[in-house]
Amino acid sequence: MTSTACFIIVSRNDIPIYEAEREDAAQLHQFILHAALDIVQDLAWTTSAMFLKAIDKFNDLMVSVYVTAGHTRFMLLHDSRNEDGIKSFFQEVHELYIKILLNPLYLPGSRITSSHFDTKVRALARKCL
Amino acid sequence: MVGAGKIKQNANVLDKPLGKGKQEVSLSAFAFLFSELVQYNQTQVDHISELETRLEDAGYAVGARVLDLLCHREKGNRRETRLLGILSFVHSTVWKVLFGKVADSLEKGTEHEDEYMISEKELLVNKFISIPKDMGTFHCGAFVSGIVRGVLDNAGFPAVVTAHFVPVEGQQRPRTTILIKFAEEVLQREARLG
């Protein structure tokens, strides 16, 4: 059971569209994740897989990334080593994201405001991480 | 209690599984819907080119969603990183799911390195549409070129996509060609990836 986790979804245009914190060290975590975006950019074109595993380290925190077909990035900052749990977490969130995307009234790249989505992501985080 | 009907619990869409979706949708329902879409947009614009732009934007929204959905459903979560990969994805998978068959042909342009063409004898969206003479080069296939642009753009291959009628000898109705012209950065990246 990890004590630190920060999850953000970044759109194709490098704008965060969703954030979820486990604790309240918000500023630093988001800074780390944004800094990792450059690495993701290059790495995304070298492989056709979606799960990019751990791509960056900061002190004892690791950044894991999952890139969707539409180049929306799911980034997770964590201190655990549970790769399978993280992979299944990403896959479940991906399904939720697709359901949000299918809404014709949702503008791709805009903030995800659904509170139900937030609840489900947090429940998944508790379950998988 | 007598008379108490079943209370319908509206499940949130996020709780329902994605599923395989409907394999088939009524053609006439789609034709009606599409014709309404075109007619509605006709009343909103002053100029033909604006009408094409609006249809293209409608298609773009579809393309953006189709890309993510199909990569998840059909391709088991593999992204396309190469030009030919994404083109054959559009030509086969997208066409098959949207129109029930793969596109007739996929060709590389001879004059320019960055041009590709997807040809179709008769686009499904144009099946029940005839263009009056005074509308010139207007093509309802702008909707389909919008879909293609949506898929390519969101996959990281920005391109200009247009639909054209190409007259064919011996055939009464002209063939439709979707012309895809990729942006410079796409070709550079392709060259870099080798």
Image: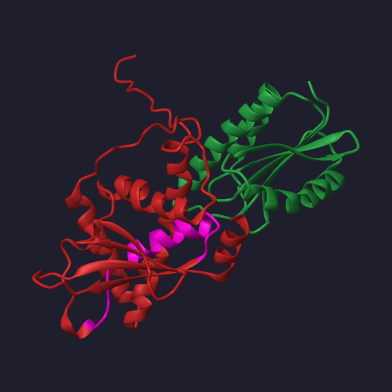
Chain colours: A green, B red
Magenta range: B135-158
Q: Residue reaching furthest right?
A: A59
Residue B151 among magenta residues:
yes
How many discs mark residues in the rendered view?
A: 0
Q: Quadrant for the N terminus of chain B, please.
A: top left
Q: Residue at x 29, y 73 (%)?
A: B164
Res B55 quadrant in image: bottom left
Specify whether B161 is left or right of B130. right
Q: Nearer the viewer, residue B103 or B131?
A: B103
Q: Is residue B75 above or below residue A44?
A: above
Q: Is residue A78 in view from this perspective?
A: yes
Q: Residue reaching furthest bottom?
A: B134
Q: Position of residue B96 (x, y in %)?
A: 30, 46
Res A86 quadrant in image: top right
Q: Residue at x 80, y 47 (%)?
A: A30
Res B181 quadrant in image: bottom left
Q: Residue at x 59, y 56 (%)?
A: B194
Q: Residue at x 51, y 52 (%)?
A: A106
Q: Nearer the viewer, residue B86 or B143?
A: B86
Q: Is residue A107 in view from this perspective?
A: no
Q: Is residue B47 above or below residue B17?
A: below
